[in-house]
Image: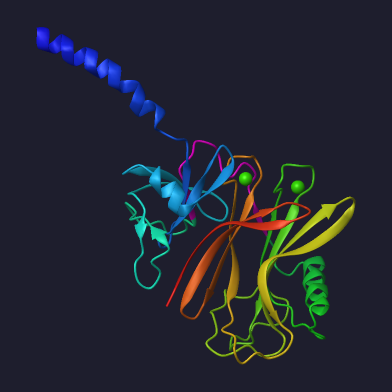
């Protein structure tokens, strides 16, 4: 009887210490390989090595694809990928997810406004890509749009438009402006006129503004370059501030990278990124 009382008193005394040490970090993972981006805490972005310290042994992530929530997945604590990328952290996932792109351990809805995949032959978008490439030095651009996504990123009145376009003149025979199949990363150095870009169009002060989120444009051939293909992977609110970030996946013939961009009207900035390549 006496021993029991002592134990209870001791536990009551120790309990508050463990509660104080639990931080409110919301980790983010890439689903395909299990790479660990880091996370956010009260809306602030936390880098991977820092966020990994406050991740539990077992974490439940909400899985999101390009257009919807795909259920949940659990994962262990992040560990180094080791060779060839010891600086990248990864988790082992409880199951596979076919369409899942990003996992987020948080209670807020990361898709408060659903993106809509639009017809990739829309002429204002084709014109916008043509003008963008001309301004980057390609005299007669061969416009090849892969995807057009409409979504209100900031929760204002206007919808924004995201466009991914890639033309590396590889051997698929799709014509200039039709919805092209998803391209492979070429092994050859880029020809002049090659590009792979993700563009954001939004209305700012009554005018349509066109900005590069990520990509590469080769006005001239470049023998030293291994061209990357850039794809619009997801559009999610990953830090809980109500604004959607744009997630871009890029890859070349022996590696890849996935990056979370914050897209404000005045500035597009990289927040967190994971990568691995040979
Ligand atoms: Ca908007
Ligand atoms: Ca956000």
Quadrant in the rendering for residue 182: bottom right
| Percent of width and height locating residue 195 | 68, 79
| Residue furthest right as drawn | 206
Query: Which color scheme does this rendered protein use?
Result: rainbow
Q: Which residues are magenta?
A: 102-117
Q: How many numbered dots are placed on residues in this image? A: 0
Above or below for 265 versus 175: above
| Percent of width and height locating residue 241 | 63, 40
Residue 8 is at least partly visible in this image: yes
| Percent of width and height locating residue 226 | 56, 84
What residue is drawn where x is 38% and y is 73%?
84
Residue 63 is at least partly visible in this image: no
Q: Is residue 105 magenta?
A: yes
Horizontal side, residue 193 vs residue 252: left or right: right
Above or below for 205 versus 201: above
User: Quarter of the picture for ligand 2?
Assistant: top right
Q: Is residue 123 magenta?
A: no
What residue is drawn where x is 52% and y is 54%?
65
| Percent of width and height locating residue 94 | 32, 51
Report the front residue among 127 and 275.
275
Horizontal side, residue 43 vs residue 79: left or right: right
Examine the residues drawn in magenta and state their main secondary structure: loop
Horizontal side, residue 143 vs residue 172: left or right: right
**Which image quarter holds the C terminus?**
bottom left
Quadrant in the rendering for residue 136: bottom right
Report the front residue among 237 and 184.
237
What residue is drawn where x is 10% and y is 7%?
2
What residue is drawn where x is 65% and y is 44%?
113
Horizontal side, residue 39 vs residue 13: left or right: right
| Residue furthest top as drawn | 1
**Which image quarter holds the N terminus?**
top left
């Amino acid at each position: 009887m006496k021993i029991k009382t002592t134990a209870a008193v001791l536990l009551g005394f120790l309990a508050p210490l463990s509660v104080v040490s639990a931080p409110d970090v919301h980790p983010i993972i890439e689903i395909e390989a299990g790479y660990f981006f880091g996370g956010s805490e009260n809306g602030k972005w936390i880098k991977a090595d820092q966020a990994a310290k406050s991740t539990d042994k077992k974490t439940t992530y909400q899985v999101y694809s390009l257009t919807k929530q795909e259920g949940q997945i659990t994962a262990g604590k992040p560990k180094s990928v080791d060779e060839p990328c010891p600086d990248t952290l990864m988790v082992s996932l409880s199951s596979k997810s076919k369409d899942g792109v990003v996992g987020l351990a948080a209670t807020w809805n990361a898709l408060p406004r659903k993106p809509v995949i639009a017809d990739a032959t829309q002429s204002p978008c084709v014109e916008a890509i043509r003008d963008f490439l001309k301004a980057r030095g390609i005299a007669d651009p061969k416009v090849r749009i892969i995807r057009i996504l409409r979504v209100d990123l900031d929760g204002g009145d206007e919808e924004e438009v995201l466009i991914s376009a890639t033309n590396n003149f590889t051997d698929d025979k799709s014509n200039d402006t039709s919805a092209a199949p998803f391209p492979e990363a070429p092994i050859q150095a880029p020809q002049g006129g090659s590009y792979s870009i993700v563009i954001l169009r939004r209305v700012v002060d009554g005018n349509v503004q066109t900005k590069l989120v990520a990509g590469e444009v080769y006005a001239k051939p470049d023998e030293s370059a291994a061209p990357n293909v850039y794809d619009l992977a997801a559009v999610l609110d990953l830090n809980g501030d109500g604004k959607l970030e744009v997630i871009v996946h890029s890859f070349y013939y022996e590696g890849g990278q996935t990056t979370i961009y914050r897209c404000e009207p005045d500035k597009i900035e990289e927040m967190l990124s994971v990568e691995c390549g040979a």
